[in-house]
Amino acid sequence: MTNPTTAERKSERELVVTRTFDAPAHIVFEAWTRSDLFKLWWPPKSMGMHLRSCEMDVRVGGGYRLEFGHDAANPMAFFGKYIEVTPPSRLVWTNDESEDGPVTTVTFEEKDGKTFLVLHELYRSKEALDASIGAADGLPEQFGQLDELLATQGASV
Amino acid sequence: MVQYTTRLDASFAALSDATRRGVLEQLGRSDASITELADRFHMTLTGMKKHVGVLEHAGFVTTEKVGRVRTCRLGLRRLEEEAAWIESYRQLWATRFDALDRVVEALKSQGENK
């Protein structure tokens, strides 16, 4: 029986994910900050993504870089900088692979030997988060399809 | 089935008008009052109220009156899309965290054996 994961849009600019782990905070924190451990769990295997490399310099101002993909010439890269590193309770980094990437904050709160983890992604604007969700982009495209449909049907509604 | 067809008719009717499609695109960027929408589309308040009424009836828009201002925002369909996205986001993290559980368990037992 695994612990439940919750996710919600907390505000126009924020996404929040929570999960409890049955281990002390220093152990969970270690799994987020050692690249040999991090690469064991971070890559979304269900999406068939192959992790090519994982470099993490976990200290304030240090960078990280994750590269996915089977083609060495065209890796899909995720990168940024750590802006806060407070073992074993807090980790903050930027997501610089896109211009409007969020700032990710992870907090590890220990209670009775368990760790309550909160992952918080703060976007620069409502538009940046909407774009991530893609819903805002979906509408005009659907309108285009509908226009075509109406045109072909010669509909007079 | 009859209900579904009626809803579909209302949707097509709502979207068959260029101004109403413009209003939806506008609300996709930000919420707006009827007055703001009327200004933007160079219409009378009464004309814009009618358009918003049609969109509201079809479920594309919801409105809320606070004081003297009626604010319009995208309706349930937009929320449904967002809810679906958040659910897939949640599942990504749930899968990751299940894998993290295994790493954490292994670390924990290493610690106990030291």
Image (cartoon, helix red, strand yellow):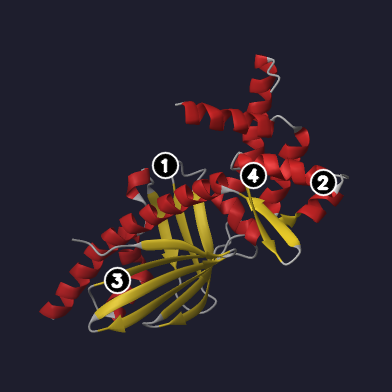
* Inter-mark Cα distance, 2 to 3: 53 Å
Residue A76, visible in the rendered structure: yes
Dot 3 lies on which element? strand
Check disc 3: other Cα within 10 Å, few if <14, some if 14-19, many if 20+.
some
Q: Which mark is residue B56?
A: 4
Q: Which residue is mark 3?
A: A20
Residue A117 locus on image (x, y percent): 36, 73
Q: Are marks 1 and 4 on the same chain?
A: no
Q: Which residue is mark 1?
A: A70
Q: Amino acid at mark 1?
A: His
Comparing A57 with A14, the one in front is A14
Residue A89 locus on image (x, y percent): 39, 82
Check disc 4: other Cα within 10 Å, few if <14, some if 14-19, many if 20+.
some
Q: Which residue is mark 2?
A: B46
Comparing A19 with A8, the one in front is A8
Asked if the residues shown at circle 2 and circle 3 are in contact, with their CB atoms under 8 angstroms apart, the answer is no
Q: Amino acid at mark 3?
A: Thr
* Inter-mark Cα distance, 4 to 3: 41 Å
Q: Residue at x 28, y 84 (%)?
A: A111
Q: Amino acid at mark 4?
A: Glu
Q: Is residue B110 left or right of residue A20?
A: left
Q: Are marks 4 and 3 on the same chain?
A: no
Residue A152 locus on image (x, y percent): 66, 15
